[in-house]
Image: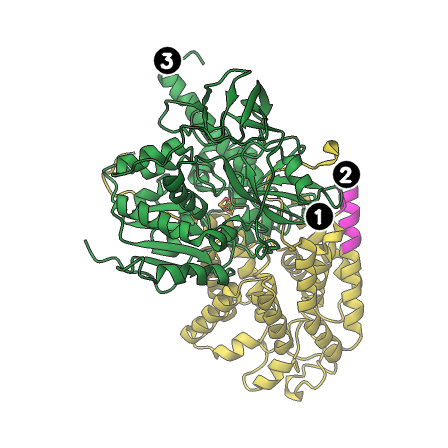
Chain colours: A yellow, B green
């Protein structure tokens, strides 16, 4: 029997966590938002989600093959990226543009840097920004949502996003249930919050980043004289705070690092919304903070048990 | 000095994991193993200097006769666990792969007690330390540190608290639990002896709250007139792994932190395993040295899991056969617990003094997954009870970056395994960190050699 015994380093027990399970939980958490998208913008949203997810998975598979690395589509992270990217797009975007976004996300941002865990910016976010810069009009063509107030209407088919609309056009209720213009996944606040609660309950994410992000954004809104609640519920803030800023790879692993990171995100989001001529600040602020993550982590190394700061003048 | 108080509830500790308890043997009476035909007693069954054999091949030995010893301060003598003839003195492979000299004794089945055995006379602390040294006692909880050295507290350290470790946080293992249920009086009288000679007035028995019967048994005695000053208290602590790790237990029981690189005495604490303390009390009564111990035999591949009291040096194969043998081909055979134990290449090894369990795990229990890329989820940081950054440590170790390893306090890692247990990518964090620690130690040795003007 001897030869059949396996010898390895301790521990010999492993928990039930797996990358795949975590990604599956993220997908489940995004389901309410995806369903809301279908209700609000019709089945076209489903098609868009399908295009993005399948393109991402296919590109992940192909790029790993070409780079002669082992296949990683089983960990479902490409599905998450595709889903997130789709939720960040307007419903009537040209599918070719969407597929180009997938190429940026999976091939350029993720696989060229070594695959899952190695990219320094969030793939879906980076893709969204590239598309925004390359195809500004297609990326800001907001089809009127089901039930949206008539006052928001720009022409026969499109309406303004809450951030662009005149004050008073959208009520809080409109924002909560998604009767407003915007990308397909960002409009329905209730669905996003539901997903966020699921992630926290399943311990996939810690509540630190979303909570601190939202709190900072609210505070900043007060300071610059905007309506905090309106700011939190509109645009991509909830989607960003709950699903984008909490991306493992591109957010700090230390507790205080998460706090600093989220404060930065909230601060810059409102700053950009208030003073820049861009319509939205979420993507840029998260991207900026993504780049700072290594530095933030270095500053926030936790104190190990029993570590005593050496008193001044003490030797060694 | 301020009056010491007893905590009402344990202090907060960070990290840890909810490993399955699997305490299948907690409610089964321990069984006594018959004398094996042959025992092998390796010369290192403790941390410290190896012993030298004091017997020759062909000698007749009695039970309890000292057969090996050392003059080194950190060491523990070894005694014959059976009566019979010394058959050979030969190298054997230890669980960690090292080769160590061992004395093989062929049993004559008589279990004749050595005439030298008599209860030691103990009137002072130094008598107690000598007696404990002569008994060959080492920490029975797994580490195997010579107990006499532990009791010999340097005079510049002010130790005011004795902590009795009954956390037994490793899955499966119940040998301490059974010790309490079967020998609770030995436990308490051992505590009283040690606390009196060391002049300690606060004894905290730290016990995981998944052993209510043991808590009750200990409380009944500790609250009786045997402890009139009420200096011995039982403190139930949460049942998460690794509450029994020395530094974590000290934190949970006293709120104090052992400084990095320091010893429990630097935090004013002496931590003793419950089996060790009960042994001291028995030794003072009978004078029989450490020749047998209780160990848990369990795991999905064991026919009839139970605690067994075995003579030290018994072949592991015989212990397993005694409890009914394997139910199926085990996937892994482990000496110690599943979180920190050593996996054995075969069952051709022998029971050591510090060996608290033998586990035969099935493939399902000890599942192995190929490691995948780190997703930077941070779960290893949350799980680390020492508040380290396992992923950074593992990365630094893989790069061979000694400065980074030091900066991230690699030496403070106690190899508890929580990080590897929790990692969703199944990364071999502990293995890498262990490698990193070895790098640091090697660098240190090289530096010393260079300073001495050594050639290398
Ligand atoms: S738990 Fe594993 S995957 Fe997560 S950060 Fe640590 S090493 Fe990486
Ligand atoms: S093995 Fe080391 S790094 Fe990992 S959790 Fe335990 S103490 Fe922390």
Instruction: Report the front residue among A169 and B443.
Output: B443
Please check the rendered image and state whether residue B257 is part of the magenta-colored stretch, yes or no.
Answer: no
- Residue beneath disc 1: B303
**Where on the picture, by quarter, is residue B263?**
top left
Instruction: Report the front residue among B334 and A183.
Output: B334
Residue B266 visible in the picture: yes
Q: Position of residue B431 (x, y in %)?
A: 57, 38
| Disc 1 packing (10 Å; few <14; some 14–19; many ≥20) | some
Circle 2: element type: loop
Label ID, residue B453: 3
Q: Are marks 2 and 1 on the same chain?
A: no
**Residue span colored magenta:** A57-71
Instruction: Give the chain of mark 3.
Output: B
Please check the rendered image and state whether residue A61 is part of the magenta-colored stretch, yes or no.
Answer: yes
Using the numbered discs, state the Cα–Cα distance from disc 3 to disc 2 in whole angstroms: 50 Å
- Residue beneath disc 2: A68
Relative to residue B385, is residue A80 depicted above or below? Answer: below
Q: Are marks 3 and 2 on the same chain?
A: no
**N-term-proximal mark, 3 vs 1:** 1
């Amino acid at each position: 029997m001897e030869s059949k015994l396996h010898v390895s380093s301790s521990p010999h027990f492993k928990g039930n966590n797996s990358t795949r399970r975590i990604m599956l939980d993220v997908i489940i958490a995004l389901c309410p938002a995806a369903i809301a998208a279908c209700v609000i913008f019709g089945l076209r949203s489903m098609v868009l989600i399908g295009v993005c997810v399948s393109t991402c998975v296919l590109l992940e598979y192909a790029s790993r093959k070409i780079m002669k690395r082992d296949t990683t589509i089983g960990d479902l992270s490409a599905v998450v990226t595709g889903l997130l990217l789709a939720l960040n797009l307007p419903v009537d975007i040209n599918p070719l543009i969407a597929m180009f976004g997938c190429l940026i996300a999976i091939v350029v941002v993720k696989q060229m840097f070594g695959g899952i865990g190695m990219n320094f910016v969030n793939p879906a976010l980076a893709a969204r920004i590239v598309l925004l810069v390359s195809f500004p009009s297609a990326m800001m063509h907001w089809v009127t949502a089901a039930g949206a107030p008539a006052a928001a209407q720009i022409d026969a088919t499109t309406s303004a996003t809450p951030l662009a609309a005149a004050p008073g056009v959208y009520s809080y209720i409109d924002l909560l249930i998604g009767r407003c213009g915007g990308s397909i996944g960002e409009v329905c606040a209730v669905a996003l919050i539901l997903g966020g609660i699921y992630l926290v309950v399943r311990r996939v994410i810690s509540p630190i980043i979303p909570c601190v992000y939202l709190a900072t954004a609210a505070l900043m809104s007060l300071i610059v004289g905007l309506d905090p609640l309106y700011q939190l519920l509109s645009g991509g803030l909830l989607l960003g705070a709950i699903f984008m800023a909490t991306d493992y790879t591109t957010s700090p692993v230390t507790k205080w690092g998460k706090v600093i990171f989220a404060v930065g995100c909230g601060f810059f989001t409102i700053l950009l919304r208030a003073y820049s001529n861009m319509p939205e600040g979420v993507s840029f602020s998260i991207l900026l903070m993504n780049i700072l993550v290594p530095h933030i982590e270095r500053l926030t190394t936790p104190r190990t048990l029993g570590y005593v700061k050496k008193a001044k003048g003490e030797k060694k | 000095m301020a009056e010491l108080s007893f905590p009402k509830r344990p202090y907060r500790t960070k990290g840890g994991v909810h490993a399955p308890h699997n305490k299948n043997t907690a409610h089964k009476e321990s069984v006594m193993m018959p004398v094996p035909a042959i025992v092998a007693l390796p010369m290192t069954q403790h941390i410290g200097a190896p012993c030298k054999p004091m017997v020759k091949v062909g000698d007749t030995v009695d039970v309890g006769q000292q057969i090996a010893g050392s003059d080194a301060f950190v060491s523990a003598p070894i005694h014959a666990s059976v009566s019979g003839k010394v058959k050979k003195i030969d190298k054997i492979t230890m669980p960690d792969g090292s080769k160590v000299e061992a004395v093989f004794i062929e049993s004559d089945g008589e279990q004749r007690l050595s005439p030298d055995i008599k209860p030691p006379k103990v009137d002072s602390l130094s008598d107690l330390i000598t007696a404990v040294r002569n008994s060959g006692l080492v920490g029975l909880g797994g580490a195997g540190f010579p107990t006499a050295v532990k009791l010999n507290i340097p005079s510049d350290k002010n130790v005011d608290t004795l902590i009795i470790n009954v956390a037994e946080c490793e899955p499966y293992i119940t040998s301490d639990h059974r010790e309490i249920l079967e020998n609770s009086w030995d436990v308490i009288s051992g505590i009283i002896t040690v606390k009196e000679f060391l002049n300690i007035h606060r004894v905290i028995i730290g016990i995981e709250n998944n052993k209510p019967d043991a808590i009750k048994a200990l409380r009944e005695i500790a609250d009786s007139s045997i402890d009139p000053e009420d200096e011995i208290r039982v403190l139930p602590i949460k049942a998460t792994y690794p509450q029994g790790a020395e530094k974590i237990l000290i934190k949970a029981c006293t709120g104090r932190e052992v400084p990095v690189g320091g010893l429990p005495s630097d935090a004013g604490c002496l931590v003793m395993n419950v089996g060790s303390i009960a042994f001291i009390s028995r030794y003072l009564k009978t004078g029989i040295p450490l020749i047998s111990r209780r160990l848990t035999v369990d795991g999905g591949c064991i026919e009839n899991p139970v605690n067994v009291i075995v003579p030290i040096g018994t072949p592991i194969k015989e212990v397993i056969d005694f409890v009914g043998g394997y139910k199926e081909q085990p996937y892994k055979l482990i000496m110690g617990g599943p979180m920190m134990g050593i996996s054995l290449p075969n069952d051709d090894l022998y029971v050591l003094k510090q060996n608290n369990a033998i586990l035969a795990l099935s493939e399902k229990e000890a599942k192995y997954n190929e490691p995948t890329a780190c997703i930077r989820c941070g779960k290893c940081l949350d799980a680390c009870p020492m508040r380290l950054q396992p992923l950074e440590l593992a990365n630094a170790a893989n790069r061979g970056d000694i400065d980074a390893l030091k900066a991230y306090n690699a030496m403070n890692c106690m190899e508890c395994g929580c990080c590897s247990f929790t990692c969703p990518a199944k990364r071999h964090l502990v293995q890498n960190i262990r490698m990193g620690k070895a790098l640091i130690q090697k660098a240190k040795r090289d530096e010393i050699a260079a300073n001495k003007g050594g050639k290398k």
